[in-house]
Amino acid sequence: MAEINAEHELRKDLAAAYRLLDLEGWSDMIFTHISARLPDSDDRFLLNSYGLLPEEVCASNLVLVDVQGENAGSSPATVNPAGFTIHSALHMARDDAHCVMHTHTMAGMAVSGLAEGLLPVNQTSMEFFNRIAYYDYQGIPLECDEREAIVAAMGDKNSMILRNHGLLTVGRTVAEAFYRMYYLNKACEIQVETMKTGGTLLIPSDDVCEHVAQQASSPRYMAQSIDLIWQAMIRKLDRIDPSYRN
C-alpha cells in the first residue's frame, strides 16, 4: 500500500511539473519531457505519453517504462524515443537523479548555440558558476548507445546545457529538478537580454562568482527555497486547473 501511495504522489508531482512547464511558456509542443524514477526502483520510471501536450498530462496518463524503453504498465501508450535515451541514461547512472527535466526554451536554445555558453552576468547566473555540464551536439539522440556519452558529460553536476539543443536538470525530487530548470532558464533569459543591449558585459571575478555559487548551493538554503517555491507553485496550479491530479 505504501508503495502504491508513493507512486501516486510521484505521478501527481510529475504531472504538476508538466503543467507548470506549460504555464511558464517552456512547452515545445509534444517534444518536451520530464521523467521521474519510481521510489525504490532502479529500472522503472515515468514519462509522458508521446503525442500529448504538456497541458494534457495528468497523473493517470503518465507512462511507466523500463530502462529498455518497454512499457512496464498496462497502458498501450508509447514514449518519445529521444526523450527515453536522455532520461534513461541519467536514471541508470545517477542514484540521485530521481527526476530528469529537459526543455527547448527559446533562451535555453539561444545560449546553447553560443561558444562561450552561460556567462555569470547576473547573480542568478552565478549560482551555476562552474556547476554547468556541457554536451556537444551529436544529432537527435535516438540511439541508446549515446547514453554513455551523455552520462560522461554530465558527471556529478546537476545542470547541463546540451549544445545546439537545450537545457537539462536533474534532482532528487521533481521539485528540485524544476527549481534548477527555472533558474537555469532564467539565467539564460538574462544573458540573452543583456547581450541584446550591445554593451560591454560586466563579469565579476571568479572569486565573487564562486562565493555566490556556494551561497546558493547551501543545503539548508536550497532545501527551504525548493520547498517554499514548489508549494507556492502547486497552490497556483490548483487555483488555475487542478485536473493534473486526475
Image (spheres, rainbow, N blue to C red):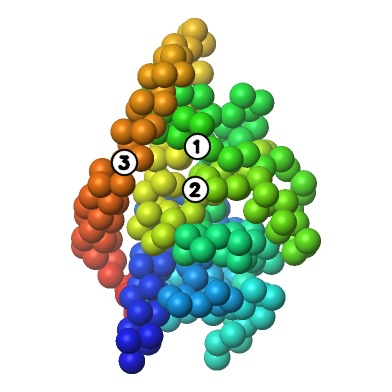
Q: Is residue 171 above or below residue 184?
A: below
Pinpoint residue 123: horizontal percent, then vertical percent: 36, 26
Pointer 1: residues within 10 angstroms few (<14), some, or many (20+)?
Answer: some
Disc nearer the start of the sequence (3/2): 2
Q: Can you say which quadrant of the picture contains the C terminus? A: bottom left
Q: CA distance from mark 3 to mark 1?
A: 14 Å
Please, what is the three-letter code of the amino acid marked with disc 1?
A: Arg
Q: CA distance from mark 2 to mark 1?
A: 8 Å
Query: Mark 2–mark 1 contact, CB under 8 Å?
Result: yes
Disc nearer the start of the sequence (3/1): 1
Query: Which label sits in the foreground, 3 or 2?
Result: 3
Which residue is under mark 1?
A: 131
Q: Is residue 227 above or below residue 202?
A: below
| Res. 78 in view | no
Q: Residue at x 31, y 46 (%)?
A: 219
Q: On the picture, is 200 further left or further right than 110?
A: left
Please, what is the three-letter code of the amino acid marked with disc 2?
A: Asn
Q: Residue at x 55, y 91 (%)?
A: 74
Q: Can you say which quadrant of the picture contains the N terminus? A: bottom left
Q: Is residue 148 above or below residue 188?
A: below
Pointer 3: residues within 10 angstroms few (<14), some, or many (20+)?
Answer: few
Which residue is under mark 2?
A: 158
Q: Residue at x 24, y 65 (%)?
A: 238
Dot label at residue 218: 3
Disc nearer the start of the sequence (2/1): 1
Q: Secondary structure at mark 1?
A: loop
Please, what is the three-letter code of the amino acid marked with disc 3?
A: Ser
Pointer 2: residues within 10 angstroms few (<14), some, or many (20+)?
Answer: many
